[in-house]
Image: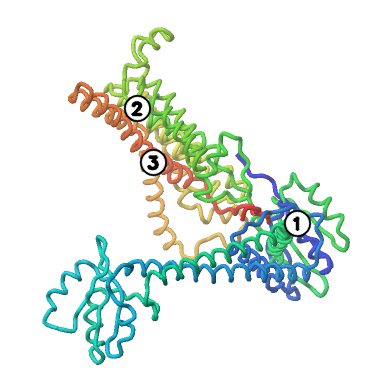
Amino acid sequence: MSVRPMKAVGIIGLSSELDKVMRYCGESEIFHPDDAMNFYENTGKFVPINERNPYQDPLAELISSVQSAGLALEFRKTKKFTVSDSGIKKYVKFVSSKLDRFTTETLKINAELDECRKNQEELNHFIGSNLDMEKLFACKFINVNFGRIPKESYDRLTELNSNPYIIFFPCTNDQTHYWGVYFSPLGSEDEIDRIFASLYFERMNLPKGVTNPEKYLEKLKAKEIALRQQLTKIQQQLDIFWTAESEKCSMYYSRLKEMNTYYTIKKYVYCYHKNFILVGWIPADQEKQFTQGLDKINGIEYTLSDGKDEIKHSPPVILKNPRFAKRYEYYVKMFGLPSYNEIDPTMLVAITYTIFFGIMFGDFGQGIVLSIVGYLMWKLKKMDIGKILIPCGISSAIFGFIYGSCFGFEEAFNPIYKAVFGLDEKPVDVMAPATSNLIVYASVGVGAVIIMIVMLLNIYSSLKRRDYESGIFGPNGIAGFVFYTSLVVGLVCQMVLGIQLMNIVYVIGLIIIPLILIFLREPLGRLVSGNKNWQPQKWGEYCVQNFFELFETCLSYVTNTMSFLRIGAYVLVHAGMMLVVFTLANMSGGFMYYIVVLLGNAIVMALEALLVAIQVLRLEYYELFSRFYVGQGRAFEPVRLEENQ
């Protein structure tokens, strides 16, 4: 329930050593760079490095050429691989030109192959026709147009018999089209072409001079074979080249990828004459191994400071939680990471979310199924929500055993209760009137206790941040805690236990005075913080504004507490929905009984799992987080080489 301690690292050295420092920081995979200007004063003479990344274009060129050739690069370790920047660029140009030539030739031949196959396909529709191609192409006063026309349009040609120039000779046909030829005399070709275009005629450009379709088809087939042979020859040449260069190319690619990644550190670097300044963050427990590497670089100096001493610079955050709670970091990150000096709420979320979900979804059989589904979601799809559903399903199974419910069968565990615990019936009968009332009251009670706990967390977190206004006088500070706790305890004693606790001294001391402190929290907070300008500029305006804020605060105490009624409500809703399922099943009878029970369980489980997950998350965010959690931290994102990207 904390964040890992961080340390700020300031590195100053000669500009000639900058590349070594960047490479080392990147290879360490624990260095999070930050803007150096936020850490120093009198920075007028410092100049940022606004250089274009020299490795970006060669890397993109190499990747593009290799992928276009249908090849793949593999990442290699390059610690023992030394090459200059000019050597990298020269090699990339060599490989790219070779691969691009292979790619260009391959694309050209494939285009010719496509054209050849297209011509064969078109010509096949005119094989065996009685048309004299030689005479048709010899016509000087008639245009000849080969192509195809949809069957619906062909049928409409009969409606155009009034025009003697509209003549279409079909050669072949299939289920959708007719292939053939139409003629248009010179001078009328535009009009005839418009008419056939309106009939969705698709023109096919058969090569002129084709007097014998069968012989020309043989020529096209021979040409296709020759083109495929050329394609095979080029592919063989490419394979020979890549066999010789693939390993070397992967080494250059890996070095380029490393340098391109590490160069991103440079945008955080500032220079002054021949020196540079670089600032970043590292985990405190890895300080020794990081500084050991820096000590080996000549011409630099570095300083280290604790993250708690650099709060104003917002140290990045790494959450530190046990294995069970770690999966719930997904929900915390959705809301926002804690600041470095703020409480990490992950453990609280892990405990409350799991318990609340189990109470609301309580069913032994459905809980086990939900855990299995969650496990499959995580293992097969790597869905973070799947890991969360595993303990939630187990919690649901535990509470389902207490409720005596297994897939909606309410008497399933009665023999176990009798044999093991000596009980004549299940411990909690959800549908019994007395139990239903108790569940509702218990939900409110649990809500009140949880709200008190998060108030204590806010007091601790605020005082840790030296936010005295929130920690002492705020609605969730000491004043708010005293007011809310006193009111809840007083009402419980008065209405439930019959103890007359709320006398005049109790009301004034523990309810009225805390409300006054909450009303005056802003000036009192500034006064305690030592701010000389602690008074409001206009007391009248302040009083009017804070009167309504105080009213809203009191209203929020009530609404937040009542919001926990949804816990008890969903317990009853689940039991009620399963009661409906079994009522319908009993009405169906026979084999349909089992079908209705099966489908009903599936629908209830899917629907209620979704609703309960959302409602519990709402309780976490609105009723708990809103009282003690800010969540304005930033993630620790070290420069790290991603081999698979």
* Circle nearer the N terminus (1, 3): 1
In front: label 1 or label 3: 1
Q: Horizontally, is 170 left or right of 248 in the view?
A: left
According to the picture, the residue beneath numbered tag 2 turns out to be 439
In the image, which is nearer the foreground, mark 3 or mark 2? 3
Kindly identify the amino acid type of the residue bearing the numbered disc 3. Answer: Gln
Looking at the picture, how far across and down is residue 22, in whole percent? Answer: 76, 61
* SS for dot 2: helix
Colour convention? rainbow
Taking the view exactly as shown, the residue that stands out farthest to the bottom is 187
The alpha-carbon separation of the residues under discs 2 and 1 comes to 57 Å
Give the spatial CA distance, label 1 vs label 3: 44 Å
Badge 3, how many Cα within 10 Å: few under 14, some, many 20+?
A: some
Locate residue 568 relative to residue 520 in the image: left or right: left
* Residue at 42% over, 41% down: 619
The label number, if any, that marks residue 262 in the structure image? none
Question: Could you tell me which quadrant the C terminus lies in?
Answer: bottom right
